[in-house]
Amino acid sequence: MANPAKSCADTVAATAWWRTGIIYQIYPRSFQDSNGDGVGDLPGIITRLDYLAALGIDAIWLSPVYPSPMADFGYDISDHTDVHPLFGTLADLDRLIACAHGRGLKVILDFVPNHTSHEHPWFLNARSARTSARRDWYIWRDPAPGGGPPNNWLSEFGGSAWTFDAATGQCYHHAFLKEQPDLNWRNPEVVAAMHAIMEFWFRRGVDGLRVDAVFHVMKDADFRDNPVNPAFHEGMDPYHRLLPVHSADTAEVQIVVAGLRQVAKRFGDRLLIGEAYLPFDRLAAYFGRAGDGVQLPFNFALIGAPWRAEAIAGLITAYEASLPKGAWPNWVLSNHDRPRIAGRVGPDQARVAAMLLLTLRGTPTLYYGDELGMAQVTVPRDRIHDPYEKNVPGLGLGRDGARTPMQWDGSRFAGFSTVEPWLPLADDATEVNVKAEKGEASSMLTLTRRLIDLRRRHGALNAGDYGPILAEGNLLLFVREGPGETLLVALNFGDEPLSAALPGASGRGEILLSTCCDREGEAVHGLLPLRPNEGVVVAAGT
Ligand code: NOJ
């Protein structure tokens, strides 16, 4: 069942808070508006810290709050060491950090190393002349002979990854929007400037950084064309027409990552979370060698997985097997870039998914509102904001539907704002909200709280080993083992009842929690009956 070699490696540096901790992602535009402009802000988040502390999470990660023209809603930064007035002030951020710390919550900020805004003073200088001081801080190439982009690289947000700058007669590279020019990490001045930004935030007390699009930071030195993707077919995101082997996840990315970790180490080894959508065998490299990678390269496998017991069991096993010695796993169900879990699997299975996320081995990241079962919202055409949806329409890639306002109560604007919010609310916001779910014994919020509490109280869940037992039909059964305790997790992925045979010599156990919140303390012997869409955690008897 459990793997003794792995548990031994894991005891090395096992005290870091993020190993047993739960991270909660806040999309600041959508969490709490405090000044009646329909957009969330930092003072708003501060007023909700008590809610977050009571939920039982350990850290909040804020998507970018820096000055930005908002072409990509903050991921286009024009000043890395200040706060956009929409969100408040630097003093508000200092206060947020202090207030969070006062409640025992860590604060993680977004760090965007791959690109800046095209309005960043560095880029304004770079594009002012070929001879400008910051020219080489970005990636410039001559157009192809006869015109056109220098190579075939594609932007993740549609079209070429090159934009021609008429004033200086060259093209600049952008892995995302043309308003997000890529920095040239081969230039030591860029490295120093970006490290200084990390230091700035670490000195202000930030506990970690989520490193955006980290796998993009180094490109092929020779700018070779990317090969065609033979698996591409109509209906896929056009970015996947090519295999981005020369423009992303190059071997040299790890040099940059090691540099980031060195900075983090100078501040007591603050947490670095790397954002990279990669298969497990590629992702493993981001842990680095001998602790010089990021501590947590985001594992997005559950976000794209077919929601079937066997498929999920297979990916858990594959992920566990891919982890380098001493590496600590992590899991994500939803984020601001992908459809919400409740939208993908439906409200009933969202409860099973929450149990899965919070009982797996490894740090869970919970996306704001998923604790309520918030829906993926269909955003009417005239209210679409996301540039991805605007550039690549009709393929269901738009991200607005996962970024709608947090639902605090059943009032007109859900307690998020006093005015119409920047994105529409979900239709069911009058029922699916914190106030309505708070006192309800079987609500999604109650379930999430109880799962978090269970995870906190049981070392087997927050630090123990994982062992697969069975994935058959709609049943997924696995074990978590810690000193002196063995917990079984049984999940029914279907809408028919089923029974799971309890493993172990006695076949006895006691239910600690059901996703229906109504079987605590129930003794089980031999067969464990599961209702449709039910998951349970069982303390195995001896
Ligand atoms: C990943 C971020 O999560 C996404 O929201 C953003 O658009 C891109 N990186 C570009 O920064």
Image: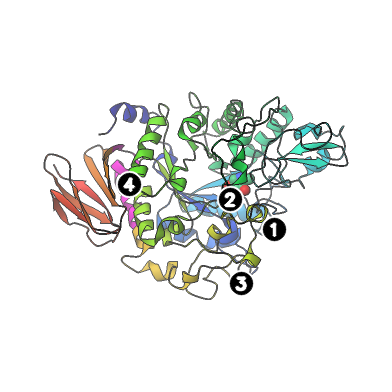
Q: Position of residue 38 (x, y in %)?
A: 62, 67
Find the distance from the CA under tag 4 to the CA under tag 3.
41 Å
Residue 151 shown in magenta: no
Of the 4 image quadrants, the one containing the C terminus is top left
> Mostly what secondary structure, the magenta segment?
helix
N-term mark: 1 or 3: 1
Residue beneath label 2, please?
Answer: 63
Residue beneath label 1, please?
Answer: 85
Q: Position of residue 532 (x, y in %)?
A: 27, 59
Select label 4 or label 2 by which is in front.
4
Respond yes or no on whether mark 4 lies under 8 Å from ligand 1: no
N-term mark: 3 or 2: 2
Q: Are marks 1 and 2 in contact (CB under 8 Å)?
A: no
Q: Secondary structure at mark 2?
A: loop
Residue range in magenta is 448-467
Q: Which class describes the residues within 10 Å of circle 1: few (<14), some (14-19), or many (20+)?
A: few
Q: Are marks 4 and 2 in contact (CB under 8 Å)?
A: no
N-term mark: 1 or 2: 2
Residue beneath label 3, please?
Answer: 420
Please state which amino acid type lies under the numbered disc 3: Glu
Find the distance from the CA under tag 4 to the CA under tag 2.
32 Å
Nearest the viewer among 201 and 314 is 314
Q: Does residue 204 appear in the picture of this structure? A: no
Residue beneath label 4, please?
Answer: 309
Q: Secondary structure at mark 3?
A: loop
